[in-house]
Amino acid sequence: MDLSPRKKAIIAAIVKAHIEQGEPIGSKVLASKLINSPSSATLRNEMSELCELGFLEQPHTSAGRIPTAKAYRLYVTELMDKKDLSAESKEIIDDMLESVSHDPENIGSTAAQILCQLTGLPTISAANPISEMTLKRATLLPMSNTSAIVFIITNDGRARSRLVRAVSPITPSLLTKFDNIAKEKICSTEISKLDTAYLQSIVISAGLDALTLAPFVSCVFEMAADIAKSEIRLNGASNLFSLCHGENEARRIMELLQERETISKIFSTLSSPIGVVFGDDTSYTELKPTGMIVASYGETQELGRLAVIGPTRMSYEKILPSIEYLSNRIGTIMTEVLKGLEE
C-alpha cells in the first residue's frame, strides 16, 4: 500500500531520532520532531498502524517505537535528505589519497582504510576479478647461480614476486628463453586460460631446458591465478567488538565477513553503484542487527567495491556522501593508472 505523507514524515522522524538517541521514540519526542505535528493521540494511532505494516516495533508495552529494517530501507531510498560532502571533507579525503596512485594494487584496500578512519566502523574492500586479465610482464631477476626472483605485473597494475630455486645453473641463454616464452605464450594469453594443460605444453616446448624452466613458469602461473581471484580485505575488525552485544557475536560476524563467497553473495544483491544491504535482507542471522553501505568503483567497468559495516541505526546521511565521493575518486585514479600502464 502507498503510505500517506504523514506516515512517511513519522517514519523519517523516528529513524532520525533513533539514530541520534538509540532509544525507543515516544509520541512526545516525535511531536517535537515534526513540523505542524498532530496530537499525541493521533501520533500514537499512526505509530500503531506503522507497527502493523512492519515499519515500527515496540520493544516493551510501555515503551516508544523503534524503526525496523523496513523503515530504514524506506528512509535511505526515499525519505533521507541527501547532502553533498563538504569541501573540507573532500579535501581531507583527497589528501589521504595523494600517494595512492603509486601503489595501484592496494588502491581499494587503502580507500577502505581511509573510510575506516573517517567513520570509525569496520570496512571491506573487494577487488573484482577482471575479465580478459592478462600479464603485462613476466620477468626473471637472477639472485644467484641457481635462484631468481620471478616478477609479474598484470594489465591492471597488480604485481607479485617470489624467490624460486632452480635444479641447475641459470644461464644467459635460459633467461633469454624464459623471456621469449613469456612474451609469446604467457603475456599474450588471458590469465583464465593459464591452466595446468597449458603449463605442461609450455614446459614440454622448452626442450632440454624444460627441467630448469619448469619451476619458474609454474610460479608465474600460480601467482597469476592468485591475482585473478577476487580479493576481500576487512579493515577495522576490532571495531566490531564495540558494535556487538558480546565477543562471540563479534567473532562470528568477523569470520563471516572474511569469506569471499559470503561477501560476493551480499554484494550481488545490489544492482546500483551505491546502496545499502540490511542484515534482515540476507540469509545470515549473524548480520541481522547490521547494515552495510556498499559502493562500487571504476569508471568504464566495475573494478571493485567498498563497504562500511555498522549497526542498523548508523548515520547514513553522513556516511553515504563519504563513501560515494571516495569511490568516485579511486575510480578516477585507477582509470588514470590503467591508461598509464597501456602507454
Image (cartoon, helix red, strand yellow):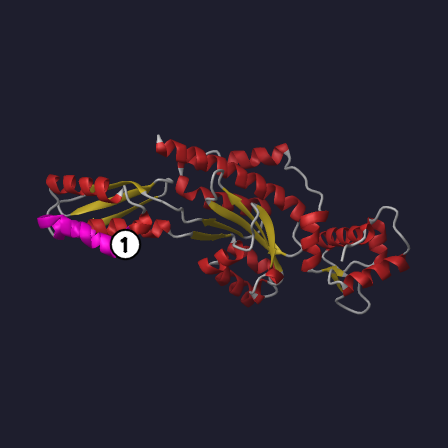
Looking at the picture, how far across and down is residue 66, in whole percent? Answer: 74, 60
Q: Is residue 201 above or below residue 248?
A: above
Answer left or right for 153 relative to 239: left
Looking at the picture, how far across and down is residue 281, in whole percent? Answer: 60, 60
- Residue closest to the eye, 92 or 294: 294
Looking at the picture, how far across and down is residue 34, in whole percent? Answer: 83, 49
**Tally of numbered discs:** 1
Q: Residue furthest left?
A: 208
User: Which residue is painted at 39% across and 46% down in the image?
Assistant: 131
Quadrant of the drawing holding the C terminus:
top left
Q: Residue furthest bottom?
A: 61
Answer left or right for 175 relative to 224: left
Reply yes or no: does residue 262 show up in magenta: no
Q: Is residue 259 visible?
A: no
Instruction: Report the residue marked by disc 1.
Output: 195
Looking at the picture, how far across and down is residue 297, in whole percent? Answer: 50, 42
User: Which residue is painted at 55% across and 55% down in the image?
Assistant: 269
Chain part drawn in magenta? 194-215
- Residue closest to the eye, 171 or 241: 171
Q: Which quadrant of the view contains residue 171?
A: top left
Q: Which quadrant of the view contains residue 60?
A: bottom right
Main secondary structure along the magenta-highlighted residues: helix
**Amino acid at dot 1:** Asp
Reply yes or no: does residue 199 show up in magenta: yes
Q: Is residue 191 visible?
A: yes
